[in-house]
Image (cartoon, rainbow, N blue to C red):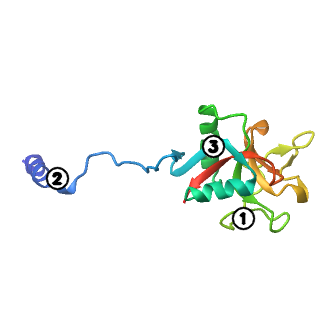
């Protein structure tokens, strides 16, 4: 009897109070796509330019150079690049030490994590990590020759871009 009353209450009132439909996940407006759990990104290997050119390009789209401060977002983005065949291109990301040599900041001025799992191993036995470029390499890019780990490059180099919708 209790089950019958409960079923009747749910049948009469349930439509307003119980939603059994799956919830829709986050969405992005084109040309941005969700990569990982919630980042709306545009990976562009056709339009290339300097770090500053591509920062401006992202701004024109209402976006910024991507901030990769989570290992899971970083892994999801690298998996996306590989899965979509967008390989063989360097991609600018939103990290730089242009303002103060050795102090790596994202474009939102938050600090960039150093070392693994983000920066590329380097040296004869991979015992060191990037950034190692010194005063002439102030902008970060994902390097296809280093499995898309972060690498510091001269900001004037040309590369594709990964923009993140803000």
Who's the residue at 71% across and 50% down the image?
Answer: 92
- Whichever of labels 3 and 2 marks the residue nearer the N terminus, that label is 2
Give me the residue at 72% from left, 41% from top: 148
Circle 2: element type:
helix
Report the front residue among 26 and 63: 63
Q: Residue at x 44, y 49 (%)?
A: 27
**Numbered label attached to residue 111:** 1
Q: Is residue 67 visible?
A: no
Count of marks overlaid on the render: 3
In this view, the mark in front (3 or 2): 3
Is residue 159 visible to the viewer in this orientation of the structure?
Answer: yes
**Which residue is under mark 3?**
44
Camera-side residue of 69 and 156: 156
Is the residue under label 2 in contact with that under label 3 (CB below 8 Å)? no
**SS label for mark 1:** loop
Q: Earlier in the sequence, mark 1 or mark 3?
A: 3
Q: Residues within 10 Å of mark 3 (few under 14, many from 20)?
A: some
Circle 2 residues within 10 Å: few <14, some 14–19, many ≥20: few
Q: Which residue is mark 2?
A: 14
| Secondary element at tag 3 | strand
């Amino acid at each position: 009897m209790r089950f019958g009353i409960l079923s009747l209450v749910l049948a009469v009132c349930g439509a307003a109070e119980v939603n059994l439909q799956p919830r829709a996940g986050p969405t992005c407006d084109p040309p941005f796509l969700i990569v990982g759990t919630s980042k709306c990104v545009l990976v562009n290997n056709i339009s290339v330019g300097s770090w500053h050119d591509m920062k401006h390009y992202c701004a024109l789209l209402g976006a910024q150079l991507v901030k990769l401060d989570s290992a899971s977002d970083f892994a999801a983005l690298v998996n996306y690049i590989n899965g979509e065949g967008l390989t063989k291109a360097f991609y600018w990301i939103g990290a730089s030490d242009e303002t103060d040599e050795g102090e790596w900041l994202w474009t939102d001025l938050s600090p960039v994590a150093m070392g693994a799992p983000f920066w590329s191993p380097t040296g004869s036995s991979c015992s060191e990590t990037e950034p190692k470029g010194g005063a002439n390499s102030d902008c970060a890019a994902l390097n296809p020759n280093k499995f898309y780990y972060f690498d510091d490059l001269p900001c004037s180099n040309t590369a594709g871009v990964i923009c993140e919708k803000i």
